[in-house]
Image (cartoon, helix red, strand yellow):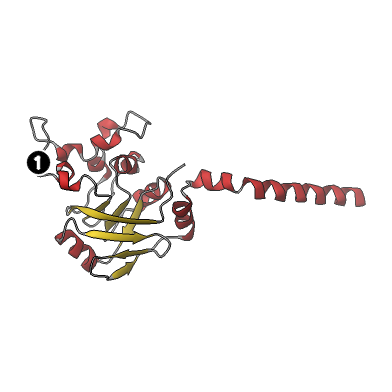
């Protein structure tokens, strides 16, 4: 069960690089676990540390000002590369709830939505503005499929109805199906009764 995602107001943390692939999000050496908890400390591991292993103070996720940021704004083609589901696991464990870019890889987008991480695609001009102004506060409304900037401008983003429902209800695909179980059982009961009546009639 995931936390329901209806609205979010948060500062942004920015990674302006393009083509951030899943191996950069979570390097392959950390894929030996199926546990999601704890993966956040390895997110962007090769970028977060200096050659001597100490944290790089210049890297955004090492800066105290970004500790509470829940929205990542990244360069074009975010999440490309392999299909590892550990990538959205690492980002959510890092505390993120949404990723904004002008292009997000399809497989990453699918994996993100299954794990309660909202991938938001906005026009290049809007994303360029966000990249140029790190740390601004954005308001995300999942029901309205919109992102609102501090000056009041609002931009809609694509989100299919099923993914939207899962986010709003805080369920993954399996959780959604399990919630339909009473209706499924009622349907099966009515159908079985109808089949029995047909059999008796013949």
Q: How many marks?
A: 1
Q: Which residue: 28% across, 59% down?
A: 103
Residue 77 appears left or right of 117: left
Q: Which residue: 87% across, 50% down?
A: 197
Residue 93 appears left or right of 188: left
- Residue density around tag 1, few if under 14, some if 14–19, many if 20 or more, within 10 Å: few
Q: Which residue: 19% across, 47% down?
A: 66
Q: Which residue: 18% across, 65% down?
A: 129
Most foreground residue, 132 or 199? 132
Tell me residue 115's x, y (percent). Answer: 40, 45
Q: Is residue 175 visible?
A: yes
**Extreme residue toward the right, this view:** 201
Residue 199 appears left or right of 101: right
Tell me residue 47's x, y (percent). Answer: 15, 40
- Please name the residue that numbered disc 1 is placed on: 57
Q: Is residue 202 visible?
A: no
Judging from the image, what secondary structure is the residue with disc 1 in? loop
The vertical placement of 22 against 168, above or below, is above
Tell me residue 184's x, y (percent). Answer: 66, 48
């Amino acid at each position: 069960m995931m936390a329901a995602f209806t609205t979010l107001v948060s500062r942004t943390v920015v990674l302006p690089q393009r083509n951030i692939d899943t191996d950069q999000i979570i390097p392959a050496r950390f894929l030996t676990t199926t546990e999601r908890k704890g993966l956040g400390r390895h997110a962007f591991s090769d970028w977060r540390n200096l050659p001597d292993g100490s944290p790089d103070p210049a890297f955004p996720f090492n800066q105290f000002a970004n500790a509470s940021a829940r929205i990542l704004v990244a360069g074009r083609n975010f999440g490309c590369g392999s299909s590892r589901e550990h990538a959205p696991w690492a980002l959510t464990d890092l505390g993120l709830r949404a990723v904004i870019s002008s292009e997000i890889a399809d497989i990453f987008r699918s994996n993100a939505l299954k794990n309660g991480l909202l991938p938001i695609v906005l026009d290049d001009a809007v994303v360029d503005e966000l990249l140029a102004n790190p740390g601004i506060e954005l308001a995300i409304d999942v029901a309205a499929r919109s992102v609102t900037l501090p000056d009041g401008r609002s931009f809609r983003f694509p989100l299919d109805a099923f993914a939207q429902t899962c986010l709003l209800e805080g369920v993954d695909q399996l959780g959604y199906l399990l919630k339909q179980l009473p209706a499924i059982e009622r349907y099966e009961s009515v159908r079985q009764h109808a089949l029995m009546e047909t059999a008796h009639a013949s």
